Image (tube, rainbow, N blue to C red):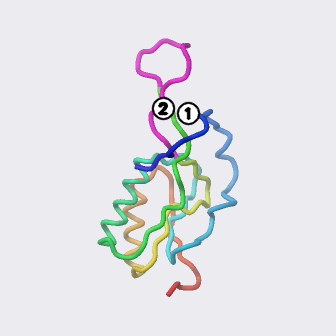
């Protein structure tokens, strides 16, 4: 699963204001001919990202090339159950990637359109945000 090799700070603020607006970066296809674009704001955990990647790779029978355009940088903490208030912030439980509407999550190339569409449909079921299939106007060779 994806997680940062090292971070400057172990724990993050929750940052609920960071979901405002639309994506201004990572919002267009850069590598492949087909992509899976996010349509709503949210957090995608490293486990969800890996499950979606596996679904794509399985459907493509390891053919073509897959790019993951997002990375789970944000540490999400949890306090153990039945712990009283106070005594600091909980331990880091997992890492998540913050996505805004318009963010391209996955890209794919080297497979037929129908196969890419089906692979991304299966991947979309693993993700907690609404997504849509996109393709570039000019086909990569």
Task: Give the magenta-colored segment's residue range.
Answer: 79-96
Query: Label for residue 10?
Result: 1
Q: State the image coordinates of residue 47 (x, y, percent, origin top left).
A: 40, 47
Question: In the image, is residue 42 part of the stretch drawn in magenta?
Answer: no
Residue at 58% from the left image edge and 53% from the top image edge: 40
Q: State the image coordinates of residue 140 (x, y, percent, origin top left).
A: 52, 84
Question: In the image, is residue 83 part of the stretch drawn in magenta?
Answer: yes
Q: Are marks 2 and 1 in contact (CB under 8 Å)?
A: yes
What secondary structure is marked by label 2? strand
- Height in image: 112 above or below 107? below
- Height in image: 137 above or below 59? below
- Height in image: 67 above or below 127? below
Q: Nearer the viewer, residue 139 or 67?
A: 67
Q: Label 1: few (<14), some or many (≥20) within 10 Å?
A: few
Query: Label for residue 19?
Result: none
Which residue in the protein does label 2 denote? 92
In the picture, residue 26 is in which quadrant?
A: bottom right
Residue at 70% from the left image edge and 52% from the top image edge: 21
Q: State the image coordinates of residue 78 (x, y, percent, origin top left).
A: 47, 28
Q: Is residue 35 left or right of residue 111?
A: right
What secondary structure is marked by label 1? loop
Separation of disc 2 and disc 1 at Cα?
A: 8 Å
């Amino acid at each position: 699963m994806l997680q940062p090799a090292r971070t400057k700070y172990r724990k993050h603020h929750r940052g609920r204001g960071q979901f405002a607006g639309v994506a201004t970066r990572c919002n267009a296809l850069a590598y492949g001919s087909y992509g899976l674009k996010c349509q709503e704001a949210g957090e995608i955990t490293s486990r969800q990202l890996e499950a979606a990647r596996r679904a794509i790779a399985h459907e493509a029978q390891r053919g073509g090339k897959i790019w993951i355009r997002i990375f789970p940088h944000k540490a999400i903490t949890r306090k153990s159950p039945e712990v009283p208030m106070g005594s600091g912030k909980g331990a880091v439980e997992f890492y998540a990637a913050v996505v805004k509407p318009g963010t391209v999550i996955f890209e794919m190339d080297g497979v037929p359109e129908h196969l890419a569409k089906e692979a991304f449909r299966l991947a979309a079921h693993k993700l907690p945000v609404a997504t849509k299939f996109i393709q570039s106007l000019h086909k990569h060779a």
